[in-house]
């Protein structure tokens, strides 16, 4: 229900704008808006409940676990340190992966040929959409050539490792920032906040 439809409905019914007609009758606007905000958390909470039920965690233990995660993150100092941890998870593994990849790929003749091709084929960032399309196409061509084995088995093995590490890195980022977003919403809805 948007603000425009609420205003139009209230005006048509000659009702005050600080109340909304619902199937249950006339309710204060704040109650309905709070209900709408809580609706965004329902799917995530149900997922956690299902995961906890499927892993045989009892309701009491599940509630303690959920509050044990959300409560410490209500403290601004803990939240700040956790946010620093999240950014470290986002940045440090990719820096380490880039350093490791460049050290190892340049150690083989096929890897050196691959890096020479990559350096030759770079289109400038200032070329706009055309340059971006060309970079994307060239990256796809390089990946296909690596998978075919055009640059040797070592390059293909390194590329496979990079794919796996990047996948785990993505999952770690989703978990870290997902917990932070979830805890912020839980703490925002708790009484006294």
Image: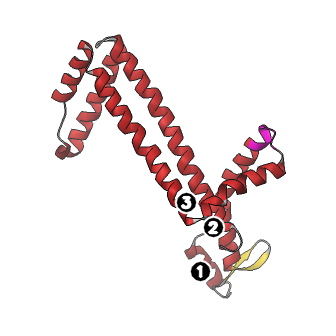
Q: Which residue is mark 2?
A: 188
- The image shows residue 70, relative to residue 47, as above or below, that is below
Vertical arrangement, residue 179 with respect to residue 114, above or below:
below
First reached walking from the N terminus: tag 3 or tag 2: 3
Q: CA distance from mark 2 to mark 1?
A: 27 Å
Residue 55 within the magenta-colored segment of the rendering: yes
Of badges 2 and 1, the one in the foreground is 2
For mark 2, give the secondary structure.
helix
Position in image of residue 173 (x %, y %): 50, 44
Q: In the image, what residue occupies the spot 40% across and 17% down?
A: 157
The residue that disc 1 covers is: 7
Q: In the image, which is nearer the foreground, mark 3 or mark 1?
A: 3
Q: Residues within 10 Å of mark 1 (few under 14, many from 20)?
A: some
The range drawn in magenta is 52-57
Residue 111, given in percent of the width and then of the height, sits at 26, 18
Of 115 and 18, nearer the camera is: 115
Nearer to us: label 3 or label 2: 3
Q: Quadrant of residue 2?
A: bottom right
Mark 3 / mark 1, whichever is N-terminal = 1
- Give the percent coordinates (x, y) of residue 190: 70, 68
* Quadrant in the rendering for residue 103: top left
Could you say which is closer to the camera, residue 2 or residue 53? 53
Disc 3 is placed on an element classified as helix
Image vertical order of residue 31 relative to residue 146, above or below: below
Q: Which mark is residue 94?
A: none
> Cα distance, mark 3 to mark 2?
13 Å
Tell me the quarter of the image containing the N terminus: bottom right
């Amino acid at each position: 229900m948007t603000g425009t439809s609420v205003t139009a409905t209230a005006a048509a019914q000659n009702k005050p704008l600080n109340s909304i007609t619902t199937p249950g009758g006339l309710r204060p606007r704040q109650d309905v808006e709070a209900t709408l905000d809580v609706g965004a958390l329902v799917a995530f909470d149900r997922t956690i409940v299902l995961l906890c039920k499927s892993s045989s965690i009892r309701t009491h233990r599940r509630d303690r676990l959920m509050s044990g995660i959300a409560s410490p993150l209500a403290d601004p100092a803990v939240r700040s340190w956790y946010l620093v941890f999240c950014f470290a998870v986002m940045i440090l593994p990719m820096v380490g992966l880039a350093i490791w990849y460049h050290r190892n790929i340049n150690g083989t003749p096929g890897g050196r040929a691959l890096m020479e091709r990559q350096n030759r084929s770079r289109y400038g960032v200032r070329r706009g959409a055309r340059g971006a399309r060309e970079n994307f196409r060239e990256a796809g061509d390089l990946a296909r050539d690596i998978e075919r084995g055009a640059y040797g088995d070592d390059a293909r093995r390194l590329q496979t490792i990079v794919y796996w590490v990047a996948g785990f890195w993505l999952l770690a980022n989703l978990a870290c920032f997902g917990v932070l977003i979830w805890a912020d919403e839980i703490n925002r809805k708790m009484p006294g906040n």
